[in-house]
DNA sequence: TCGGAATGATTACATCTGTAGTCATAAGGG
DNA sequence: CCCTTATGACTACAGATGTAATCATTCCGA
């Protein structure tokens, strides 16, 4: 799967949330903080099509865009990449790191323990 | 902190492992798979200096390079970035994701539970 | 029916990145 | 003392990315 750039991801997020959509509809839904013009969104859509992570279907003279990959799979790939690069491919050092950096609230700890308990049963 | 590119990270890893080093010494230690020339390594070093993530100290007519940031901090930043972008800034969904994708071995689970127990005490 | 608006395609351009090559210079060996 | 060589600085260039503008075409509303 080709890499999705940071800006392109904003477009993917819109379409993972709701699809299919036209270019104009995607542009409406991109977070306003981006301050993107419609032209910019169209460029993103073309590049994402070229990368094969979006599909399009013709509807009259327009396209309806929809994701060609699942968010779940993309997240898995990016998480794996981080774990490989930063933690030697092992998950435990990641959790240890998060723990040491106070990223875990008591509620988080409870919930993670619950997840792990369920995993064992 | 400025972003460190993928290739540049290979140079940082060398210097986090051992420093200070000259450009030639860094080049020797970069993983051979990269197949980099000395010139490439020098370019990386310059760019990392410009980004402020490396320091240099003159030693005769050469430089000795050393990290200006801790690996720990860089890892924290990159992990935080992933968690923000992929998991809405929350750690628990990340762990849930890893669990669902079979990234956790029984040994991992044990060790994570241990980390969490210690965190609570 | 006709003209403006909307659409995808194409082009533009600056910056970042990967991957060097060149160049002036200084230092060390003979 | 001079020449080779190692070094940092500068330059090069293609591909990815952010951010559009332009262009040909086609559809819809008046």
Image: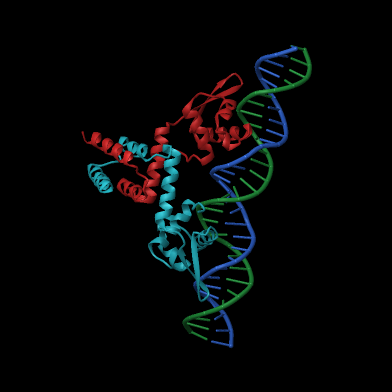
Chain colours: A cyan, B red, C blue, D green
**Image point 56% across, 22% down: which residue?**
B58
The answer to which quarter of the image holds residue C9 is bottom right
Quadrant position of residue B73 = top left
- B8 to B100, vertically: above or below: above
- Residue at the spot x=60%, y=26% of the render? B24
Q: Is residue B117 above or below residue A18?
A: above
**Seen in the image, is A31 located left or right of residue D18?**
left
Image check: A12 left or right of A105?
right
- Residue A5 position, x and y percent, is 49, 52
| Residue nearest the viewer, comparing A39 with B95 | B95
B38 or A1, nearer to the observer: A1
Seen in the picture, residue A19 relative to B54 is either above or below; the reply is: below
Percent x, y of residue B42: 60, 32
Q: Nearer the viewer, residue A102 or A110?
A: A110
Q: Residue at x 61, y 36 (%)?
A: B35
Looking at the rendered structure, the number of numbered marks drawn on it comes to 0
Location of residue A117 in the rendering, given as x and y in whole percent from the top left corner: 24, 46
A71 displayed left or right of B119: right
């Amino acid at each position: 799967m080709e890499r999705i750039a940071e800006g392109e991801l904003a477009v993917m997020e819109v379409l993972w949330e709701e699809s299919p959509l036209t270019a104009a509809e995607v542009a409406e839904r991109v977070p306003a903080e981006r301050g993107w013009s419609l032209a910019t969104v169209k460029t993103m859509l073309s590049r994402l099509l070229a990368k094969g992570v979006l599909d399009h279907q013709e509807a009259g003279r327009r396209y309806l865009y929809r994701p060609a990959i699942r968010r779940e799979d993309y997240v898995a790939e990016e998480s794996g990449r981080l774990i490989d690069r930063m933690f030697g491919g092992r998950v435990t050092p990641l959790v240890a790191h998060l723990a040491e950096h106070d990223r875990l609230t008591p509620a988080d700890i409870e919930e993670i323990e619950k997840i792990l308990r369920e995993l064992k049963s």
